[in-house]
Amino acid sequence: MADPTLVYPQVKLTLTPASGSSSIDVTPWVRSLRWSDSSEQLNSMSVTLVVPEADDLGDDTLDDFQTMVFLPGGSFKLEFYEHPTGSTPSTTLAIDPAPTGDIVSVRHGLTVDGRWTVALTGLESLHRLKGINITSVPDGTATVEVADLIAECGEEVKATGKLEGKSYAEDTPIILDQSKLALLKQIADRSNQRIVWDPEAKQIALKDRDPSEDVTVTWGFDLKEINMTLDLSQVATAVEVMGLQPLGKEDLNVNITAVKLTRQSSDFLGTDLRKSAFGANKVTEQSWGQAWPVGFPNTKDNLMTRANAVMQNLSDKFVMGSLSCLGKLKASQDCTVTVAEAPWPYKGTFVISDVTHTYSPDDGITTEITFYSNSLAAKT
């Protein structure tokens, strides 16, 4: 197949057909490529390839290329490498393990001058779990019940499908769809873990996150552009959750007036700024007994978990921003990005929600980071 010395030193894209036969390195024909690591959606890849002439394929044949590229259903492996030293290509992966997944769609384009392009869309392999019933997630040597994970994070999810007389807390299957897959990713993120598809065991598993994924960008050096919005419209200074009980039982309610986790300096906390500028405001929610979370009745502890989650989520909408920088391939959603040597309010450390790496042969790799926080850094 293709000679590996032909690939660009920073990126290597390998495709394997659904048949599982030999793979092909398509990097020399990449016109543009994007890899998105998201906290709200499944991780995805989009790449546009120029279909080569038969004479340009070297040891590969046009039939090989068509088998690998022209139809969806195959798989991809995307390898990002550290920047080369001088003229020597790096062999150290910048994202380890390398992103993998499935090619789910292929779009063909042909211009009047005969230029043929193929645009591929790939998704991380978690997409295969859509529609599958699960009750637990492996976590190392232990097994974590999905309902327990959801309860710990204060998320509201309802099981679908038949209960068949099984216990809510232990055996209720959760039918996975796009939103619930994203939910499981968020649950893992909050425990500083990743939820991944294990192709050998054919199951999902929790793995610890690498702390080296926290990154720093420097004003005037590797930071290309930054935008930031400070918004008090969705910030709440208090949250009340009312737990409605069945007839004959006393209703419960909890109130909180502070976030559990302050991202940066308490001098510029969104909830405090909202209160001083416009006065106090309270968000009220209701919880209907066993409807939230799945298998967990309304208790003080469960209501407090939900109230804290709502308060944190609303307060984190105070600072919303994005930046683009050179490199920074280790950036990962729900880790942090620190903006250094920048004027206030840009400077500080923020939580990453989404990361997109964009590659082209002419421009190399640019990283786009979307971030949030419930507070700003101190002015000093």
Image (tube, rainbow, N blue to C red):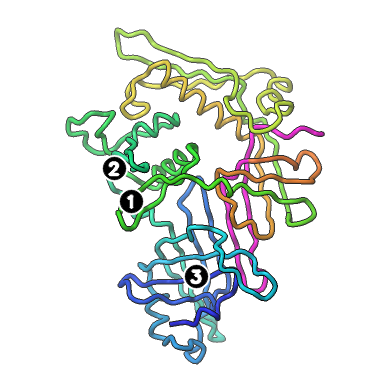
Residue lying at 53% horizontally and 75% vertically, measured from the top left: 27
- Tell me which amino acid carries mark 3: Leu
The stretch drawn in magenta includes residue 157? no
Secondary structure at badge 1 equals helix
Which range is magenta?
351-380
Q: Is residue 95 left or right of residue 144?
A: right
Quadrant for the N terminus, please: bottom left
Q: Earlier in the sequence, mark 1 or mark 2?
A: 1
Residue for badge 3: 13
Secondary structure at badge 3 equals strand
In whole angstroms, how far apart are the C-alphas of marks 2 and 3? 32 Å
Q: Position of residue 275 (x, y in %)?
A: 69, 20
Q: Position of residue 322 (x, y in %)?
A: 66, 48
Circle on res. 129? 1
Residue for badge 2: 134
Q: Residue furthest left?
A: 165
Within 10 Å of disc 3 (Cα), the crowding (few <14, some 14-19, many 20+) is many
- Tell me which amino acid carries mark 1: Leu
Within 10 Å of disc 2 (Cα), the crowding (few <14, some 14-19, many 20+) is some
- Tell me which amino acid carries mark 2: Ile
Residue lying at 46% horizontally and 75% vertically, measured from the top left: 108
Q: Is residue 295 left or right of residue 355?
A: left
Mark 2 and mark 3 residues within 8 Å of each other at the beta carbon? no
Quadrant for the C terminus, please: top right
